[in-house]
Image (cartoon, grey):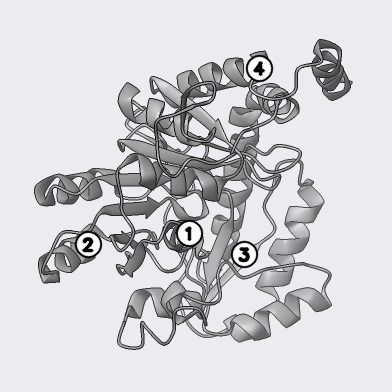
Amino acid sequence: MALDATLQRVLQRNWFVLGEEVREFEREFAAWCGVAHCVTVANGTDALELALRALDVQPGGEVLCAANAGFYASAAALAMGAVPGYVDVDDGTLTLSPAALRQALAARPSKPAAVVATHLYGQLADVEGIAAVCAEAGVPWIEDCAQAHGAERGGRKAGSFAPLACFSFYPTKNLGALGDGGAVTSPDARLADRVRALRQYGWSAKYHVSERGGRNSRLDELQAAVLRLKLGHLERQNAERRAIARRYSEAFEGLALRLPVSCGADNAVHLYVVRTAQRETLRAHLLARGVASDVHYPVPDHQQAVLAASRAGVRLPVTEAACASVLSLPCFPGMREEEVDTVIAAVRAFRGQEHGQEARAC
């Protein structure tokens, strides 16, 4: 009924693009993230591209990112004519490694245009380390928070660490709309104003174009109203995700699986991902017992067909090993106790687990 009333409120107002609902959601989400500014856009990939444009990344400029995060940062870079470059990830968190980033920066004859750090599966990256490396090199960076709504460290939420941070509100995200949607957050009014202009044709005022690279990338009023309603439930739903993750990790302790390094506040648990060399065998075993699973993500960016020829010499051992072994188990708000029990029993019954003691509880 709350959703019906929310949608009716928008319909009765008869204003559907960039109106009161968008303005209020931007204000509320900025406050929730702990930043001064939020600019909504049409989707998460647009958020990344417009953030790169706001940083003055030019065609041909290099954008460093992780290669195990679904090609989204790569797609944004390619869409604006930039060149994605790849940095290996930390073996524990599977997020961008500050040490690998420092090495990558030192090996380049010129500075890249920007760095994108993805909080993968909901796990907050080493933002302090990444920020320090980027500051030393004089390279701007962006947080990709598409899977990390509400992950926090030291009282600061994802989206409040970098000059610009990007969110997706795709329906399956921790904070999801009824369709596509995205946002860019920033502590910097100038950068936020640039994104605001770029999302609507590059306008500084109606029909006055001041920014190159502008487009139509606007969140509509219906989606903004839904997001306002759902934002009020996000903390509780993230707590549900973490509780399920802790049950899994406790139940899987001692099995030949690599488990998430954290089920705490720094992980919004968008996905609960284990690693195993027997992934396909385990998937088949789970499916036979009525348990769905998925792989996020099976092909590293530098090995995707669109880039494989030009990245033939790229070697990212941690990334490549992760893409060959990750497996996502069911974990979502509203999941019933008996459903969690079914997943646990199915994983523990897998005979391929008999050897090895890799798993540790969060």
Splitting the image into 4 quarters, where does residue 174 fall? top right
Residue at x 55%, y 31% (from the top left corner): 40
Residue type at mark 1: give it. Answer: Ala
Question: Mark 4 or mark 2, which is nearer to you?
Answer: 4
Mark 1 vs mark 4: which is more N-terminal? 4
Give the spatial CA distance, label 4 vs label 2. Answer: 41 Å
Residue on which disc 3 sits: 328
Residue at x 81%, y 15% (from the top left corner): 14
Mark 4 vs mark 3: which is more N-terminal? 4
Residue on which disc 1 sits: 79
Residue at x 48%, y 40% (from the top left corner): 214
Residue type at mark 4: give it. Answer: Gly
Give the spatial CA distance, label 4 vs label 3. Answer: 38 Å
Give the spatial CA distance, label 1 vs label 3. Answer: 29 Å
Mark 1 vs mark 3: which is more N-terminal? 1
Question: Mark 3 or mark 2, which is nearer to you?
Answer: 2
Residue on which disc 4 sits: 19
Splitting the image into 4 quarters, where does residue 163 fall? top left
Give the spatial CA distance, label 2 vs label 1. Answer: 23 Å
Give the spatial CA distance, label 1 vs label 4. Answer: 28 Å
Q: Position of residue 156 (x, y in %)?
A: 36, 29
Label 2: how many Cα within 10 Å (few below 14, some 14–19, many 20+): many
Residue on which disc 2 sits: 101
Give the spatial CA distance, label 3 vs label 2. Answer: 27 Å
Task: Please report contact status of discs 3 and 2: CB closer than 8 Å, yes or no.
Answer: no
Question: Mark 1 or mark 3, which is nearer to you?
Answer: 1
Mark 4 vs mark 2: which is more N-terminal? 4
Q: Is residue 91 visible?
A: no
Say which element carries label 3.
strand
Residue at x 31%, y 54% (from the top left corner): 58
Q: Position of residue 351 (x, y in %)?
A: 66, 84
Q: Position of residue 45 (x, y in %)?
A: 53, 50
